[in-house]
Image: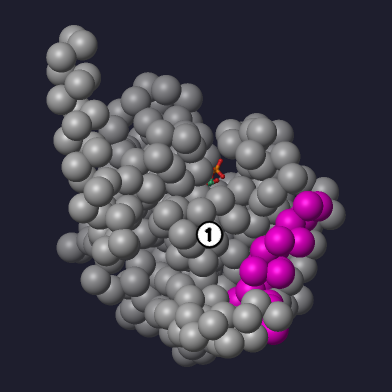
Amino acid sequence: MKKVKKAIIPAAGLGTRFLPATKAMPKEMLPIVDKPTIEYIVEEAIASGIEDIIIVTGKGKRAIEDHFDRNFELEETLASKGKLDLLNKINQSSNVEIHYIRQKEPKGLGHAVWCARNFIGDEPFAVLLGDDIVRAEKPCTKQLIEQYEVTGSSVIGVQTVANNETHRYGIIDPFSSSERLYEVSNFVEKPKQGTAPSNLAIMGRYVLTPDIFEFLDLQETGAGGEIQLTDAIQKLNERQNVYAYDFEGKRYDVGEKLGFVKTMIELALENDEIKDDLSAYLVETVESLKVKS
Ligand code: G1P
């Protein structure tokens, strides 16, 4: 069995939910406290044993490439001022070889993944979406890779969502399970409210066999008029088992405003520099809200 060594990070989306902030800045560069969201994703891939990452970018995404490049001028300035802690921070992900490819038209997630097919070749690979940050004892992608190593099949990361949220996600129709691993009869992209076959939602983490590209080659547009990865996964599932794995860990939805702000607060409360002042401020704010209501 070939090992999972490569990962695709699609980052070509327009980020319309965060306009006007994303008019001239990629949404993947929006910081959670002091780190761009995409850096959390790259860190998870590295911690999962991934050796090669390809980021699928689009128009206006140059800042992502600059971020993962070295900045000698900045490094020299920080070194000369003895700011070694900051120097350490900016170098952390620069040691990794990251590749880039452009998605030339915004045709959807399935198409973005398809754009990386030549880089992937004939190997199993991971896909990590930037709208979901997962914090777990064992990195989420690593959990999926371990399941791939047991089953020899594609494995999709899922978690339970509330009934009124299923229409925002790809949803699985499971037919059997052992512990956290499910066999799936159907993968449905963004089912209409009230029609979801379960509450188990695809959470932006995938390990796929390269056979998926055969289906992405032919995949027609689906939900939202886009080429959907979920639809190609369902076609693959009709030929070879695709499993879903209810991964352990907390998932943060940084793809929408409220989720983004909540994530920012939670992670800021762990930041030694600001946590004490921030918690005092939050307590004060909650008290003043109580007085008003
Ligand atoms: C994408 C996938 C969807 C998945 C979601 C997770 O949708 O198509 O299946 O559940 O990511 O964040 P998007 O949010 O890009 O519309």
| Residue farthest toward the top in the current orientation of the protein | 293
In this view of the protein, which residue sits in the foreground, 5 or 209? 5
Residue at 64% across / 86% down in the picture?
Answer: 76
Q: Is residue 118 left or right of residue 64?
A: right
Q: Is residue 266 above or below residue 157?
A: above
Q: Position of residue 135 (x, y in %)?
A: 31, 62
Total labels drawn:
1
Scheme of colours in the image:
one colour
In the picture provided, is 62 more to the left or to the right than 92? right
Outermost residue, right side:
104
The residue stretch that appears in magenta: 53-72
Q: Nearer the viewer, residue 164 or 179?
A: 164
Helix, strand or loop for disc 1: strand
Residue 188 can be seen in this image: no
68 magenta-colored:
yes
Q: Which residue is mark 1?
A: 36
Whether 54 is among the magenta residues is yes
User: Does residue 115 appear left or right of residue 247 in this picture?
Assistant: right
Identify the residue shown where x is 54% and y is 76%.
90
Query: Residue 121: image x %, image y %?
Result: 69, 80
**Which quadrant of the view contains residue 242?**
bottom left
Identify the residue at horizontal 31%, vertical 39% (top origin): 161
Q: Nearest the camera: 88 or 50?
A: 88
Q: Give the vertical position of 51 relative to 234 (above or below).
A: below
| Residue 239 placement: quadrant | bottom right
Name of the residue lying farthest toward the front? 81
User: The disc labelled 1 sits on which kind of residue?
Assistant: Pro
Pointer 1 local density, CA inside 10 Å: few below 14, some 14–19, many at least 20:
some
